[in-house]
Image (tube, rainbow, N blue to C red):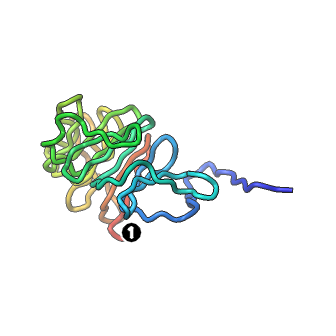
Amino acid sequence: MTGAACRFQPNHPSWIEAQGQARGVRVGAWARGALTIGTDRHLWRYPGEWSRPWLPEGPPQELRALAGSPTAVYGVLADGQVARYQDGAWAPYAGSIGWGASDVSASEDGVVLVVVSGHVRRVDGLELRDTVCPALAAAGVASLGLERAFVLDGDGALYDGGPGRCDHVDAPVRLVRIAANGRRLVAVGADG
């Protein structure tokens, strides 16, 4: 007789430990699970097969940042271009060669935000548009949609940006990375 493990999820936030090992320098989420940029420069996805829980996706690619939406995965290439992962390869956005992006975020409704020269900008076809917190020197961004995003400044302070506002949000420690999925914000503190 064989059996399988089963885990019931509580109705409150909880952690689920990924099986297997992966060494990543950036982490993201997409519709099919978790993603990481490995130390080997591959994009790795979880979950994989039973015997290989982390599987490589596509060829090695140097990436500065990684983001996922329900429909796509985005990255900032080493030269600052923004690219979309499709058909097993990274396809740079036409016109993004001069952007010099340092971070990228994608919301559940497909809004892609980038940090360019310390400012959060919305990707609109081939152009960049002003968006939330225009006066803030941004280091990171977590998109929640067309009119809302969390923004991280260079000192590790967090801001909640919306139409005509950019409100400071108290955090228990200085932050180094942020990401969002739906209405949830995930942050990594300077203390790990």
Residue nearest the viewer, comparing 41 with 19: 41
| Residue 132 drawn at (x, y percent) | 22, 39
| Residue 108 drawn at (x, y percent) | 41, 36
Q: Which residue is drawn at 45% across and 43% down?
A: 30
Q: Which residue is drawn at 65% across and 51% down?
A: 9
Q: What residue type is labelled 1?
A: Gly
> Which of the 4 image quarters holds residue 156?
bottom left
**Which residue extends farthest front?**
59
**Which residue extends farthest bottom?**
191
State the count of labels: 1
> Which of the 4 image quarters holds residue 173?
bottom left
> Which of the 4 image quarters holds residue 42?
bottom left
Residue nearest the viewer, comparing 28 with 13: 28
Assess disc 1: are there few (<14), some (14-19) or many (≥20) residues with their C-alpha within 10 Å of its C-alpha.
few
**Which residue extends farthest top?**
125
Quadrant showing the C terminus:
bottom left
> Horizontally, is 153 left or right of 32 in the view?
left
Quadrant showing the N terminus:
bottom right
Mark 1 falls on what kind of element? Answer: loop
| Residue 12 drawn at (x, y percent) | 58, 51
| Residue 129 drawn at (x, y percent) | 18, 33
Against 103, residue 163 (above or below) is above
> Horizontally, is 160 left or right of 164 in the view?
right
Residue nearest the viewer, comparing 91 with 28: 91
The residue that disc 1 covers is 192
